[in-house]
């Protein structure tokens, strides 16, 4: 499994993804699920992927690298002119991979399983964040619901539901993503360290932070420990019921 | 869906269950999922149920009310001599309902879906807590893992994973169950108020608390509000990363 979360806040975008893949519990590996297209001053895009690894890699290959076809060379995320064109490019790649691999997967009883979070900004255009489904259709994050999750999303959802909103500060958003990820890591073995973080400040047209975070990262360790301590203090501070 | 959680702590047992049932999102209703057998001074048992409502009711009917069969009258939870006999009685009832209703359900593509948490104590015997599966087999909570959950369990698991242990005070356990339930209520529409709480103190042989809690319960309202406030303060108190 996988856990990826992305925020679309007033001040910018936050992306966080784990790196664990597994084919059964006895075959686990580390693969980054974060793909970055960055041309400083011109465009920044980040795509987080969940699902069958062969499918997600095929989709990302199709949108990151141009190929020659009968109609000429295919477009890439580095060439599209808007985030809307970007999400449609990814959707078309999902459709294409489904057409190629779907029947064979189905014949072997393997689901065609892919979901992608795609966010970013191109110079002169709006910053946007999308979620693309296996069926290649997509939704966009809004001010009402400024976060999107894919993969093993339930463990890390309550903290976002409770306190995140569109006006949350960008680095408070990073903290909340860390807490959401840590809750998932602790409760589900199929989500694992290290994790990949990317932070984009609106209109910056370059990433503020792009960082791999392992178990030895002092800040992440501090957040994990401090958060558990805070929860313990917070529940102990609640009064006892009078029942 | 449903969310039920039960703790088996050094000091006693805590049971908490929601009351929402649904057949599609446009057909929801309120049914208690908590069944209590209490003979003060002699025995206390609480069973929480999740799954197909007709199946769980059939199972509970079978173990709560005696019927005449060719072999004589069937036993009930009020008559068994140990918690182990109780969990086996429930398991046998699951098997019996599966035999009766399983083929018809399968023919109509409805899963045979039932899971039950059963805990309690009989005079002179150990206090125990079990989880019974659809296949009628079961597991028991231990000091290493003193909580069991059925239904929509993921949202409310992180708080229990982080801070609950076997030596947690009984009413701290109640608070943690409330927090776990509240996280689930907020994030998943198929789990709904009111909720049913039962608290049993080891060797008391009567329930300490048996209470239905609605949205108007002042203590539960306080916990909900205070917990969200505490989380907000806790994440804001975390230092900003230096990335």
Image: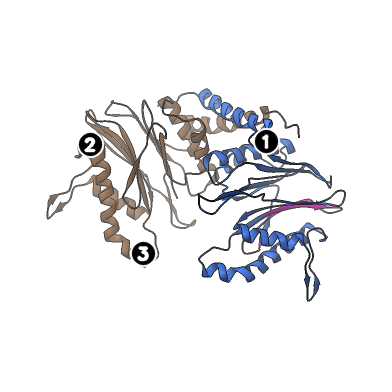
Chain colours: A brown, B blue
Q: How many neighbours does mark 3 have within 10 angstroms: few (below 14), some (14-19), or many (20 or more)? A: few
Residue B135 within the segment the image draws in magenta: yes
Q: Chain of mark 3?
A: A
CA gap between label 2 and label 1 equals: 49 Å
At 28% from the left and 29% from the top, the residue drawn is A206
Q: Which residues are magenta?
A: B117-137
Residue B77 horizontal side relative to residue B95, left or right: right
- Judging depth in this view, the residue of B9 and A119 nearest the camera is A119
- Judging depth in this view, the residue of A203 and B103 nearest the camera is B103
Q: How many neighbours does mark 1 have within 10 angstroms: few (below 14), some (14-19), or many (20 or more)? A: many
Residue A82 horizontal side relative to residue B220, left or right: left
Residue A106 visible (yes or no) = yes
CA gap between label 2 and label 3 equals: 34 Å
Vertical comparison of A143 with A25: above or below? above
At 52% from the left and 47% from the top, the residue drawn is A188
Q: Chain of mark 1?
A: B
**Residue A94 x, y percent position in the rendering:** 29, 52
Residue B133 visible (yes or no) = no
Residue A107 horizontal side relative to residue A161, left or right: left
The residue pinned by badge 1 equals B175
**Residue B179 x, y percent position in the rendering:** 62, 37
The residue pinned by badge 2 equals A82
- Does mark 3 fall on the same chain as mark 2? yes
Task: Check whether the beta carbons of the residues at disc 2 and disc 1 lie within 8 A of each other.
Answer: no
The residue pinned by badge 3 equals A106
Q: Secondary structure at mark 1?
A: helix
């Amino acid at each position: 499994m996988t856990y990826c979360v992305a925020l679309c806040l007033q001040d910018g975008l936050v992306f966080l993804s784990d790196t664990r893949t597994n084919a059964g519990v006895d075959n686990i590996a580390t693969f980054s699920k974060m793909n970055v297209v960055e041309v400083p001053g011109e465009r920044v895009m980040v795509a987080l992927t969940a699902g069958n690894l062969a499918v997600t890699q095929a989709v990302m290959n199709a949108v990151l690298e141009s190929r020659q076809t009968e109609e000429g060379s295919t477009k890439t995320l580095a060439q599209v002119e808007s985030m809307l064109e970007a999400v449609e490019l990814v959707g078309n790649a999902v459709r294409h991979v489904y057409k190629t691999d779907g029947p064979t997967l189905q014949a072997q009883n393997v689901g065609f399983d892919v979901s992608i979070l795609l966010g970013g900004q191109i110079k002169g255009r709006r910053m946007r964040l999308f979620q693309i489904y296996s069926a290649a259709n997509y939704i966009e994050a809004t001010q009402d619901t400024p976060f999107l999750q894919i993969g093993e999303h339930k463990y890390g959802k309550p903290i976002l539901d409770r306190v995140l909103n569109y006006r949350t500060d960008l680095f408070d958003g990073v903290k909340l993503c860390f807490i959401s990820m840590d809750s998932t890591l602790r409760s589900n073995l199929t989500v694992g360290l290290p994790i990949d973080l990317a932070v984009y400040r609106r209109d910056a047209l370059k990433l503020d932070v792009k960082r791999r975070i392992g178990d030895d990262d002092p800040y992440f360790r501090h957040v994990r420990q401090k958060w558990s301590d805070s929860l313990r203090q917070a529940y102990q501070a609640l009064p006892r019921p009078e029942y």
